[in-house]
Every structure is written in C-alpha cells, then in structure tokens.
Amino acid sequence: MAPLTPYTYIQCPCSDESSPDADDDDRTFDPRAARSNYSLYGLEYLLYCEDCHQIRCPRCVAEEIVTYYCPSCLFEVPSSNIKSEGNRCTRSCFQCPICIGPLAVNSLEAQPDQTHLAAPDTPSASHGGPYILTCSYCNWSSTETGIKFDKPNSIYSQLAKLYNGGEHRLTPKEHKERRKEALQASAVSGDPLPDQTLDVETHFAALKAFYQSQLADANASTTGLSSLEGLGFASPASLSRIMSIYTGGSLHDKRAKSRIGTMREALTSDEGLQLASLDESSSISALRLHHASTIPPTTYQHQTPHLGALPPHTGGARFPSHLRPIPCLLRTKRSKRCPLCRHIISKPEAKVSTTRFRIRLVAGSYVPSISILPLNIPQPSPDGALAPLVPAQFLLKFLNPIFEPVRVTLATPSKTPGRFGAKVTVLCPEFEIDANTDVWEDALKDGVAGKDVAAGARVRRGTVGEDGQQQPEVGKIWERGRNWVSIVVEVVPASLRLDLLAATGKFAGGEGVDAGPLREDEDVLEIPMFVRVEWDADTGGDDVGSGVGKDQKEAKEKRELAYWCVLGLGRVRQ
Amino acid sequence: MSRRPPRGEYIETDTGNKVARKATLVGTQNIMLGGKTVIQPEVMIRGDLNTAVSIGRYCFLSRGCCLRPPGRMYKGAFTYMPLRMVDHVFVGPGSIVQAASIGSHVHIGARVAIGEFAIIKDYVRILDGTVVPPNMVIPSFSIVAGQPARIIGEVPEGGHDAFELRDLYKTVGNNPQPAV
C-alpha cells in the first residue's frame, strides 16, 4: 500500500448544518461521514472574507467569469462571441480525436519541411498547401479521414465547410437556399421532397431554428406576452407554457391552455426531423471487416460489436473514418465573491497573459497552517504504517501568518470517530504564537547572521531526558520559533482486527456492532480537531469615517476564528 | 597543493549558482544561468547544439534531468531553437525538457517528458510521469498530468507560494542549511 503523507484538511463553515437548538457542545466532527468529503479542503484551496471574518471554500463562493480564452492560442474571446459561436476556439486550435494531443498544421507539399510546427497560427510564405492537421503524439493526421485544407490559417471555418472525405459541406445558409430550390422544383414536378440525412451540427441548427420559430409563433398569438417573443427557451412565456402542460390546465391562464395546440414537433428534415436508421447491419458488417483485418478471427467472434458509449465530442462517430478534429474548449478566468456579503475575495487581472491578481484574499494568510511531523514512532514498518495499540507521538507545527500574536485552543475527541477509534491526547491544547514579522526583516536577519538567528529562534521547552533526548511534557509546548509553535500529540491507534472488534462489542453489551470487512481507507488514522484562534486586531481603518475618537481608534478589537480540521497521520498496520 | 580549501560537491559562483561537479554541462558558452540556480549531479544541459539555453533565477534542476533545445526543419536545414526558462522553475529527477519556453513558477515532477516546442506558461504544475506532447501550449495556473498530457485541474489561489524555490535553494550546496 502506498505510504501516506500526513495531511491537514480544514472544514469550511458553509457545510456546517448545525441547528441552533441542538446541544452543540458534544457534537464532534466525523471525517469519515459521507458528507465530510465535500467540505474538507487543503488550506491552499480556501479563501478568506475580510468583512465576514470567515473561511470560504470553492463550493460556497460565487464565481463570475472575467475572461474567456483559448488555452492553446491564448486568444481572448469576447463574451459576445461565446453566444454566437459557442464555447470552442474558432481559430486553428484542434485536439486529436484519438489521443486529445494538440494538432499542428502541416503542409502536404513539402513533406520533410515542418515549418509550421511551432506556430500553427502563422502562415508560411515558403510553400503552399494543401495543408493537413497532424498529431505529433500519436501520428494521427486528417488525411486519414480525407480532410485537407487550402490555407494554413482559420482552419475552423475551413473545417466547417468540409465533410470527412473532403466533400463540400453546406453552411446553414446554403442549406436553406438549396432547400428552397428543391422546394420549387418539387412544386413544379409534384413529387414530395426527399428526406435527407443530416449531420450533427446541421441537425441541431435545424431543430433549434424550428423550436425558436415555434416559440415565437406561440408568443405572437397571445396579446399580453407578445413583447417577450424572441427571448427563447428561458422566457417567462415558455415557462408558463410548460407549467400549464404539467398542471393539466388547472391554472387560470386560459390563453396558455389554448396555446398547447399551436405547438407541434418537427415533421421534415428541414425542421430537424431525423429518422433513426434502425438497420445497423451495414455498420456491424463494416465493424467485423475492420476487426477481421487486425484481430485473428477466433477472438473477434466472441466480441459483440461495441456500438454504444461513444465520447460525446465525436458526434456519434463509430469508425475511425468518422472522426473529426476537436476544436479546443475555451477556458475562463474567474473572480470570486463572498456568498454572504458579496465582497470580491479573489479577482484576477482580465488580461490572459498576466498572472497577477487585483484581489486575492487567501486563507493561508489569515489562518495558522498546521504541519505534521513524526516525532516518536515505535516499530515503524517499512511502508511507514503505524503499529496498532502502541502510542505514537507526532509534532504539530502551527505557523502564524498574521502580524498579531494569536492564542490557539485545540480540542479533539479523546477517541476518534469510526469503528476503530484511536485514543488521542493533545499534550498542550492551549498556547500562544508570536506575531509574524515582515518578510524584509526576516531576509535582513538571514543575511547578517542567518545561523545564529535560526538557532536562537528555536527555544525548546521541555525537560531533557537522561539520554540527552528531549522528553515531551504535559501542558508545555515542544518548541517555539519566531512565529511558530510546535506541540506534541500522542495517539494510540486501535487494532484493526475484526474479531477483536466483535468481541469488545459483545463485552460492552452493544447489539449493533458492525463487524463487516475493512472498508476502503478505514486504516487511515484521521483525527478531527477543533481549532480556535483568538487575537486582538486593530479596529482602525474601516471605521475612520464613523467619527470615533482618537483613543478609540487605537483600541484593539478581539477577533476569533474557530473551525474543524482533520489531521491525517498515517495508515495503521493490519 | 593541499593548501586550497577542500573541494565541495558544488561549485558556487558569484551570482549564487550552485552547480554540482558531477553535472554534465556541454557547450557552456551557450548556457546562461540567471543566478541562484541549483544544478544537481548527473544533470545534463545540451548547450552544444548551437543555440542558447537560458535559465532564470532560483531554478532547481534535480538529479538526472536533461535540458535539450528543441529542433526542427527551418528553411531547408535542421535547426535548433533556444530553450528559455524563467524564474523559480523546478525540474524533477529524471525529467527530459525540450520545451521552447517555460514560464516562471513552474513545477515539473519526476520522470516527465516535455516534447519539442512545448510552451509552458506561469504557475503550472506538471505531475510525475507526464508526457507533454510536442507543440502543446499549457496556460497559466494549470495542473497537468497523463500520457499525453491533459489539463486536469487549476492551481488554487492559495497555492501560489508553494512554487517559491528560495527556501529549497538554501537547503543544497556545500554548506546547506536545514529546511525550515
């Protein structure tokens, strides 16, 4: 089993569903509860709202998109283009349909010359097309599906006009015109229009156009709501229509009832009706043929042709010849707001090329970080697992990031929750950490007498044993530095033997002892710990405008932050 | 002869570079170190390919990694192009880097292969064993893994400090300081 590196996860208060009337004091946090997975985060994932003085996690913040950009060409896409052209890059950025590696534009003409490799966006004057897309990871190329391009740039729009095999594909506009001509021709000859087969994009476009026209018609036929037409599917009119359908017309809206009759489904391929071809024998035989050429006949006979479960981006492709290059999905830069006070707590610069943030309130600069070090672990096995029923000691190092001294109070349940409860003793549950100092000060000290300062800063508290080793002492911190304190936690892991569990359960007279087999990660020793941090903060700054006196301005305000966290110490040997 | 101070494992330059004596640097006239860069033993940097390899400040090249400028056909001849690496780049042990450019604050794990002309922007974490295909562009704040590499996540706002290599720089050299 893989050794486990110790970790600390913090529970975001947003998931705390405690009811005010329940006696809260006895309630402890269970890291193994099914919901806990969704509320525990590493410190680096957490943000901090300065106005609410509370931790905020990725689940509870409200996100706003600042910029859309293509991750491949790093081109910033205006949000208006997202609405009209969709969420994929419309330049020349494509992914391989087989291995999702990036595709490069290459010239077919001068085969060994690969001038475009580095910059697929820049056309080369040295030689002409035709151009193809190639994957430099798996060697797939668009020639395998018969696609070649005339120009090395704006591949997206060129690809939109091509079917696999190089056949010219009609744009929706051309499609309409072609259809109109056919309609006129059929009107002359009297023959009904033949149904065509549609590809995915045309199919969707036709259906969308049809439904939009249907909605617009339905809205136009009513008098009061006609101003809402053209709002599409999310309009209140369409909502009321759906409501009236599902409530069986029991609502008072008579007009909505009459409107049901006006909606109909698509009837022709023009409107997006695509009859499913249920005869798949040709596909199956093609698949057999395809397999027969690569796999010995004895194996393929036992395999049923795998026709379902296609990746969505292939658009229902079943054969390598149906594959099309995948345009790159756009990415976003997002700002984050506090869910309660709506203040922005993280805001990146809008430009794609910069990595700076205008606002970045991360929890790491407000909440002490906790790192775990093994101190005294008897009989460690080669993979670092802890021996059951033997006390092991760990050092918890608390680092204070704020510029005020903080008082920390810790609390843990004496026995960890779960079937295999380990005994936990925090030797020093209350201590004070000195304030953080300026980075500059630190750097200067390092430069002058780095070693002396480093040595002087470490003050050990605790008695030295006979063997010269420091002995952990109850009620005293282990070591203290400039802005950090380390304390000792003693753990007695429980035995993971199921027969013991059943026996102790019977002895205790408990009926419902779960003696089932060991579940996944049940051997990981996790300690829930309640951390309460108190400090005196300056009240000045925000309240200057409220007309407080000078002496009040210098008054300190007591601040408190309390949260649950989980310390993962290691696996227990079985 | 023995009057000189004992030779350490590293050569420390005036600008603070720490280069292991057992590292293989070929074509040193093409290799530019920005200062405070650590090059561990068994690292190879190919400066002999007629193009520059430039490395910024506080970069850390772990044991057994290799930096090699990317090459391609250009105007009828096979040409090598410069490899540029900005500040605070960590290259894990056994990794091979043939990127065109690597931004600042990039962490490349162990046994990673970075294909020719890949462009890696700032604050990118590449997990162990990743194979980055040639020509791939990795935008800022990406976590990348897989063969071929794909973007599997985003670097959180609070994770930026983890890319700093100033402390790591102090822990190696001829008189290393213990990690804080």
Image: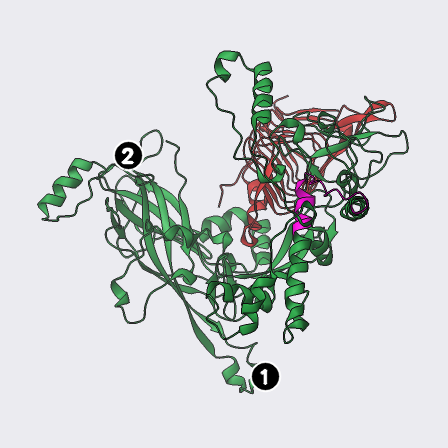
Residue at the (74%, 33%) spot, across then down:
A104
Q: Label 1 neighbourhood size at 10 Å, few (<14), some (14-19), many (20+)?
A: few
What residue sits right under mark 1 in the picture?
Answer: A545
Which quarter of the figure has residue A150?
Answer: top right
Q: Label 2 neighbourhood size at 10 Å, few (<14), some (14-19), many (20+)?
A: some
Q: Specify the amino acid type for callout 2.
A: Arg
Tell me which label, 2 or 1, sits earlier in the chain: 1
Using the image, tell me which numbered label, if any, was put on residue A573: 2
To which chain does the residue with label 1 belong? A
Front residue of A564/A423: it is A564
Location of residue B146 in the rendering, given as x and y in whole percent from the top left corner: 56, 33
Which quarter of the figure has residue A92?
Answer: top right
- Residue A194 on the magenta segment: yes
Residue A231 visible in the shown view:
no
Residue at the (13%, 43%) spot, across then down:
A504
Location of residue B129 in the rendering, given as x and y in whole percent from the top left corner: 55, 30
- Residue B109 on the magenta segment: no
Residue B157 visible in the shown view:
yes
